[in-house]
Image: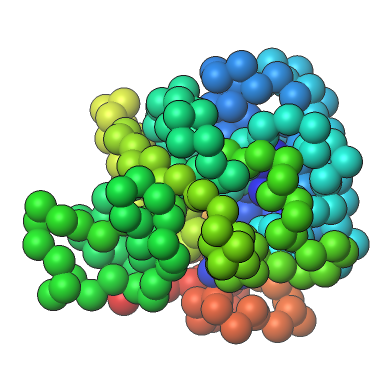
Amino acid sequence: MILSAGYGTRLWPLTEDRSKPAIPILGKPLVGYVAEYLARYGCDEIVVNLHHRSGSVRRALGDGSTFKVKLHYVEEPEILGTSGGIDNARALLDDETFIVVNGKIITDIDLNAALETHRRTAALATLVVLPNPSCERFSLVKAKEGLLEGFGGMPNPGDYVCKDPPLMFTGIQILEPNIFDYIPRGVFSHSTTDVYPQALAKGERIAVHVAEGHWYELSTIKRYLDISLQLLAATGTDTSKGSDCRISASAEVHEAILWDNVIVEDGARVRRAVLADNVRIPAGSLIGNEAVVCASLVEGKEPPAKALKGELRGDNFVVSLAE
């Protein structure tokens, strides 16, 4: 199952007209990377839950044939959370071991190794985690001898040494159907706050598989831009362009992610920026460390509480990514 129902409020306004997993990254929807990842490990049937801008995920994935999988879409009229969404799809999941992956990640973590840990430990569930040596703001996973003890707040760098970094959850989990014994029916719930603590209290074994590999999580605009540029750098380029983009010969565009139908006019300078669909950067303009969408997309809309602040500049709505 791919979790794809979230609002993506920290990515707003890029998520005003699409779900977070439907955001393009280097010419492919983010959720497409997850579908391909699962397909590489023989997962040929995938459940996708939908809520916010559900049509954008359907358009991104289609029937799944592009990614060599068969898809089952499950709508959530009301958002149900990470475990509530699984409950809503239980009729498709409750007869064998299944894998759940967050729809906002790109990774090459060895899923077979995680499955081996799951089988060896005979666990109800296995969380795939990574060391977090930089103490980025991801909740702590507390483990002992390969088993989950619980979850904590954000890591404090002063509490750890290099040889013993904190662990963070990757958004990949392997589950047995008995997990449904701990998921409340038909209500909003989260795995880490509502399901796993209850299972642990009942003495269930929840394994923690410490993985290796690349893992990118794109939950903010800054992370989206930084990771896109990092992936681009590996190809020897610094700019990604969608379809039907027009850049004036006198314009300068570097370290930029352009979606579809973007126009950059004479003498404009763009550096470290995301330019969304149909954006036009007027002649002589300067865009730096910013995300830009068409003003018409957000006109009259109230920004989500977690969204970055922006301002109107002519026909554009511009969000600064400066910290």
In percent of the image, x 59 and y 27: which residue is there?
38
In percent of the image, x 34 and y 37: which residue is there?
211
Residue 144 in the figure: left or right of residue 44: left
Q: Is residue 126 above or below residue 6?
A: above
| Nearer to the camera, 249 or 57 | 57
Image location of residue 320, percent across then percent down:
42, 73
Image location of residue 165, percent across then percent down:
20, 57
In percent of the image, x 41 and y 62: which residue is there?
149
Q: How is the image coloured?
A: rainbow
Figure quadrant of residue 7: bottom right
| Nearer to the camera, 310 or 305 | 305
Image location of residue 136, percent across then percent down:
30, 63
Is residue 95 shown to the viewer in this render? yes
| Nearer to the camera, 62 or 274 | 62
Is residue 138 shown to the viewer in this render? no
Figure quadrant of residue 22: top right
Q: Residue furthest front?
A: 203
Query: Which quarter of the rendered picture does the N terminus lie within?
Result: top right
Query: Which quarter of the rendered picture does the C terminus lie within?
Result: bottom left
Image location of residue 116, percent across then percent down:
45, 26
Residue 141 in the figure: left or right of residue 193: left
In percent of the image, x 28 and y 71: which residue is there?
155
Figure quadrant of residue 178: top right
Q: Is residue 24 above or below residue 321?
A: above
